[in-house]
Image: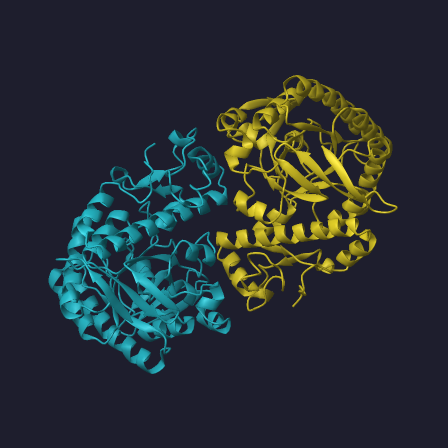
Chain colours: A yellow, B cyan
Amino acid sequence: MFTIRARSPGGRARTGALHLAHGDVQTPAFVPLATRAVVKTLEPREVAALGYELILGNTFHLFLTPGPELVAELGGLHRFMGWERPIITDSGGFQVFSMGHGGVADEIKGRGHSRDGSHGAIVAIEEEGVRFRSYVDGRERFMGPETSMAVQAALGSDIALVFDECTPFHVTREYTARSTERTHRWLERCLRWHARHGPEHQVLYGIVQGGVEPDLRLESAETVAASPCPGVAIGGSLGQDKEQMYEVVDLSAEALERRAPERPRHLLGIGDIDDLIAGVQRGVDTFDCALPTRLGRHGVALVPDPGARWRLDLAKARWRRSPAPILDGCPCPACAPGFSRSYLHYLLRARELTALRLVTLHNLTFVAGVMAQLREAIDAGRLPEAAAALRAGATSYSGRPGS
Amino acid sequence: MFTIRARSPGGRARTGALHLAHGDVQTPAFVPLATRAVVKTLEPREVAALGYELILGNTFHLFLTPGPELVAELGGLHRFMGWERPIITDSGGFQVFSMGHGGVADEIKGRGHSRDGSHGAIVAIEEEGVRFRSYVDGRERFMGPETSMAVQAALGSDIALVFDECTPFHVTREYTARSTERTHRWLERCLRWHARHGPEHQVLYGIVQGGVEPDLRLESAETVAASPCPGVAIGGSLGQDKEQMYEVVDLSAEALERRAPERPRHLLGIGDIDDLIAGVQRGVDTFDCALPTRLGRHGVALVPDPGARWRLDLAKARWRRSPAPILDGCPCPACAPGFSRSYLHYLLRARELTALRLVTLHNLTFVAGVMAQLREAIDAGRLPEAAAALRAGATSYSGRPGS
């Protein structure tokens, strides 16, 4: 289900394509979130028009509402939400454990208990699975490996992820070790359930855990590589800063390259521009992250300005009178018609939904452009130069973001 | 600036075109609101794609923020908001007086002090104008006929409305009489200011007031007809129910037909489907109203179901499992791709912005279709039949709304 087209000389980066039930996905690729069966503020045709071939639906949220039975009754997740291309569903593990652990969250503001602002509560983590209280109706619900697989089967995604515990950064090595062992046992149970009941068209990705402990990461990568999962995701706590995160990704991807070089590698929950570049260089094939869309809804536009963390906050008073678009030459629905920063600033301050949508469209356009540049560079055998240029603020557009 | 193409035999209904600085507008036409320089949840290109040729910007809100100076600096309202077709701006009178009077509002829920949910306060109504407290920063501001004209000049709209007092339903006849007299004096001042300082390209509409008093309405219609305003709007309190509203509109339009038959007539703030049909039959050329877009943001879709007031509330539990689109055969971005009521219901419950946008697009598509049918019927000399069919639930689409 994965073919490799070109490899970066002397590195692990590669271009290729996932061949999935609902179509092909050119890699390396960024995967926008469709948490609640929608890429927030957008329509499916718009996401497709930006060039995205794969989106990620959220098993945990869809399990609680509208429920997998209803989605199945309406023809599965693709039909329900009107998206004809491939879908990957996460396992729900991240969300379930976020409720208990907290702190993993990469919330922009650093607030909230979970990455999606949901407020539930874990009742018990057991070998069988996790009992928790639903944020929808307060009822006690259960999710374990088999539940997660059954929900993902009902949703009918192209790629399902195994149910895992997403260990946070602040726990002990012992906790991480025990948790990683349990995640490996859950991997076996997921594989068993999927082999018997999983939809023919759905492929299963294992998840590498192990926190920031190099030996646990290595062991986890080898365990997943030894499993028959056709794809692998790298998840869990990736460290306290970018340097440590890159080390953990590097270590995991290196082990996977050694043991399962032909399998696609997905990095969970990472989407800063510099992290996308770094991830591709380390051999990651796909990434999902709330960041580009969430920043958009906060009025923060992505721009080729590494010194400002690639961000331009349109709500800032300095843009009140600025006639410039977000980014000169950008082909997105915000920049191409020439909407000024002044206008977007005004709409954001007036809480007009149109602005959240326009900045979301811009951000997804920007990320799609970066990924396209990386793919082209790998195919052309000049990834190091392209990565350096991107890191210095180059884009395929003509514009200067600071103007 | 107005040419009449066809007249309904034995009636006042007519088709025609407004010839404005930024293009022509086929009439009868519905005018979507762009209160804060945006048709809520949409982009200008989308509003144009639905066939709309004229939108209405709000002088009061744009006066307070971002301010006419900033809009002028950014090239005027058209350029600021990226809308290249004609714009009409209301005078601000309605909003200023709503703060004091309340109750005029056609709020869906019947709550709130003004039609847009803004909360300000009138400090004093004087011959010169109105002093009020801004809902933006609490500062005392002033608006009179000249202010309103100057703001509309800075915005650069194609059609400006004269500053008027919008008298509510619950005041005495004496209050209405005095207020209407003052509105006529303000009309003179607006004309004077506009003749000296108004933009060349901008045309001015007078406003007929007079509450529900037939003699005051007649007098007001004659006063406006006697003025050199190239267009006329019908405003103010239109009664306590539809029957009285139709009488007031009928009376006003009849007087205008007698005294100024060649001038276009705009009906302010009316947009229920049956009211659009009734208004066209009584000789109204253009209508503006928040209703189609506001209903959309509340998840209420317009459908050809007169028995349900043309409304289908997608948030209702009965649609939870419905695979049907809002309206079979409807060409809008919600119905054409086949989004189910079940999906829209789910998105609305999950507070996903995409749903508000989709229902808004549906509603504006539906209203555009009704207006197109009315225009075609007048041109074909069969308005009574078409109006009866529309009132019975016919559309140009094939669908049945109750399915």
The residue closer to the viewer here, A114 or A25, is: A25
| Residue located at (62% from left, 52% from top) | A365
Q: Is residue B194 above or below residue A301?
A: below
Give how far across and how far down residue A16 sits, in percent. 74, 41
Farthest front residue in view: B380
Quadrant position of residue A390: bottom right
Quadrant position of residue B30: bottom left
| Residue located at (60% from left, 24% from top) | A153
Give how far across and how far down residue A27 sits, in percent. 72, 43
Q: Is residue B95 above or below residue A135?
A: below
Quadrant position of residue B83: bottom left
Give how far across and how far down residue B139 sits, in percent. 43, 66
Q: Is residue B20 above or below residue B253?
A: below
Q: The C terminus of chain A appears in which quarter of the rendering?
A: bottom right
Q: Is residue B213 visible?
A: yes
Farthest bottom residue in view: B196
| Residue located at (55% from left, 34% from top) | A78
The residue closer to the viewer here, A8 or A308, is: A8
Q: The N terminus of chain A appears in which quarter of the rendering?
A: top right
Q: Would residue B117 be found to the left or right of residue B350 on screen?
A: left
Q: Is residue B232 visible?
A: no
Q: Would residue A55 be found to the left or right of residue A250 on screen?
A: left
Q: Would residue B218 be found to the left or right of residue A89 on screen?
A: left
Farthest right residue in view: A10
Q: Would residue A344 be found to the left or right of residue A90 on screen?
A: left
The residue closer to the viewer here, B109 or A325, is: A325
